[in-house]
Amino acid sequence: MVFMKKTDFATEVGSGSYIEAFLYRAPKKNHDAITQNLNKFVPWFETNGVRVELYQLAGRETEEVIESSKAAGMESMESIAKTLVAEDEDIWVELQYFRDHNHLKEVYAKMMQDKSLEPLGNEFLGLITQGKNLITGGFRRLR
């Protein structure tokens, strides 16, 4: 489920050669508040040349794929929702597309200096599941 507006932004910026991925959990009751919070962050990233895509785990659809795979003899698949024990939580994936790793460093340095983002960041951290870490990693495009 993508929450950002469809624009020519993806064409304008391209998909980039470096992606920073975030995986986090949030109580289901915080779904609307997180959606609103993230939609306030996206324009800041777009202004700084970063495309952001937000997704929420499609739990039932994932279970259907796993059940089908197991019925076909593929026993090695497991649901991410079960692995992360997310019964009363939504699992979110956020993808941030940068031109390269240096672009990421520039944008994040700018973000740390922008005090206007501090309330949004604090709100976000209060909405995600407490006691759990944001899981993140950078990925370079393979060609």
Image (tube, rainbow, N blue to C red):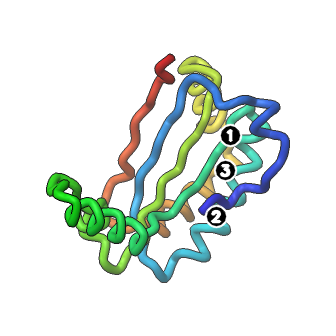
Residue at image point 74% right, 32% down: 49
User: Measured from the top left, where is residue 84 in percent x and y?
Assistant: 26, 62
Residue 10 falls left or right of residue 33: right
Front residue of 112 and 137: 137
Question: Image quarter for residue 115?
Answer: top right
Residue 3, position as x, y percentages in the image: 67, 61
The residue beneath circle 1 is 51
- Residue 16 drawn at (x, y percent): 63, 26
In the displayed structure, 101 sits above or below 12; it is: above
Q: Residue furthest front?
A: 72
Q: Residue at x 58, y 17 (%)?
A: 102
Q: Is residue 30 left or right of residue 47?
A: left
| Labels 1 and 2: the sequence-earlier one | 2
Q: Amino acid at mark 2?
A: Asn
Let me know if residue 119 appears in the view: yes
Q: Position of residue 5 (x, y in %)?
A: 78, 56
Q: Residues within 10 Å of mark 3 (few under 14, many from 20)?
A: some
Q: Name the secondary structure under disc 2.
A: helix
> What amino acid type is highlighted by mark number 3?
Leu
Q: Is residue 84 above or below residue 50?
A: below
Identify the mark at residue 37; answer none if there is no mark: 2
Q: Is residue 29 above or below residue 92?
A: below
